[in-house]
Image: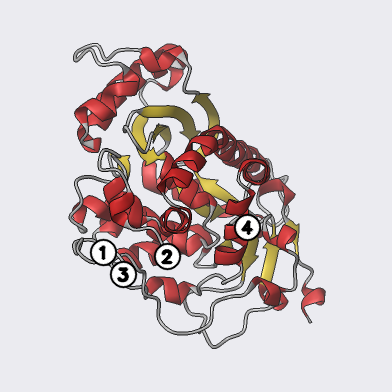
Amino acid sequence: MSNTYGEIPDNVRFKPYMPLFPNTWNLFQTFGWQAFYQFNLDSEAGCYDFFETRFNESIATSEDVTNNKLKAPDKVLSYVLLLPNVAIRADLLQGTSKLFAGESVDLTYVILKHDTQEVFALLNGHLEEGLPVDWWFVRPDDELLDRRHMKIGYKLKEIPSRIKDLRKSSMRLIDVFKDIRNERTPQWANAHYFVVNAYETFALNLLYEPSSYESISQGFDGWAAKELYGLPDYAFALIPWPQMINMFLYQGRAAFTSKLASLATHGHLFISPFEEKNRELVLRLHSHIYDWYQKEKIGKGVPYPIQTLQCEFPNLKEKKNPNNQFEYKYPSGEWIKPEELGISRDELAKGVYLDVTHETPVEKKIDHSHIISIGIGRSTEFIDPASKS
């Protein structure tokens, strides 16, 4: 019997948003609150590795694109630093980033504890001309988190938990971050500033999500928590929302997902990698969780993009029916099965870029001939067209 919503303690700040993220929600339903809570605590150490891997590779890949060192950048995937849930083709990274945020940008990821909403850690990145050029990470024991806001006097780490409203707390955080930015890198004192609020549970959910389309749609759900689904606040928030992204959001879940996918990969599906360091951490501490991932996520397959776009979102307002209120309803049809791609599970864990878009019908069998490349960033392996015949 699966565990239900009512078993989550009411004092957990992230409780109302748990059903928004199907991977961590399924983990809770399968293993229960105590097991999930311990898993969340043990996974905090992996947050640094998760973001470090993505940021470092994004910066290195961008440098190679700029210096014309990267072969076939249209087949190489990287990440949009402004939206950590979006994988993007290396040749589209600069233009898309500039389109969203401008020429010179600072952004700070505020990683929030799922239980108290205090700041767990910070990750700052800087973009020039749409390309990432610098970043730094603040761990939970860093004294920087004890720095106080000049006007309200709150410590940086306690601002989100004391103000609660993510939009208001973000503006207070930006005050502090700008002071830090101007001290450390005064040459960027006039850069635009964004804050990305993401609970640690959101990062965990991304780690266990293979589909790039699903990852994008879950970013929408984090915004829609407050705007559409009637929940107290955002579960994921970029403050201030860039004008273009804001416009996409108000067009709905399917339109938002398809438009971002189009800008990021020309609509092609990317089966996201499971970062090696995090895989090793999970296998060492919670091997049963990785077994769950292999069975429930990889074993059952990846939805076709069109299935993601047509997915019916659960009704979060009907709290009286905990056994079926949070089910995502996908249209009928088979999903993309990894074994039909003709590659090993280890190769799949590197990331797989497919010639599959929202126009691909679910009746079409996806096999090895649809693989464009394997991997992400500079380690990408290109599939020889001759091997597809």
Query: Callout 4: 10 Å neighbours few (<14), some, many (20+)?
Result: few
State the residue in front, 220 or 287.
287
The answer to whether residue 126 shows anywhere in this view is yes
Q: CA distance from mark 3 to mark 4?
A: 24 Å
Residue 376 position in % (x across, y down): 66, 52
Mark found first going from the N terminus, 2 or 1 = 2
Q: Amino acid at mark 4?
A: Asp
Q: Amino acid at mark 2?
A: Met
Disc 1, SS? loop
Mark 3 lies on residue:
324
Residue 66 position in % (x across, y down): 63, 42
Q: Amino acid at mark 1?
A: Gln
Q: Which mark is residue 291?
A: 4
Q: CA distance from mark 4 to mark 1?
A: 38 Å
Query: Callout 1: 10 Å neighbours few (<14), some, many (20+)?
Result: few
Q: CA distance from mark 3 to mark 2?
A: 13 Å
Mark 1 lies on residue:
251
Disc 2, SS? loop
Q: Amino acid at mark 3?
A: Asn
Disc 4, SS? helix
State the residue in front, 133 or 240.
240
Q: Is residue 130 left or right of residue 165?
A: right
Mark found first going from the N terminus, 3 or 4 = 4
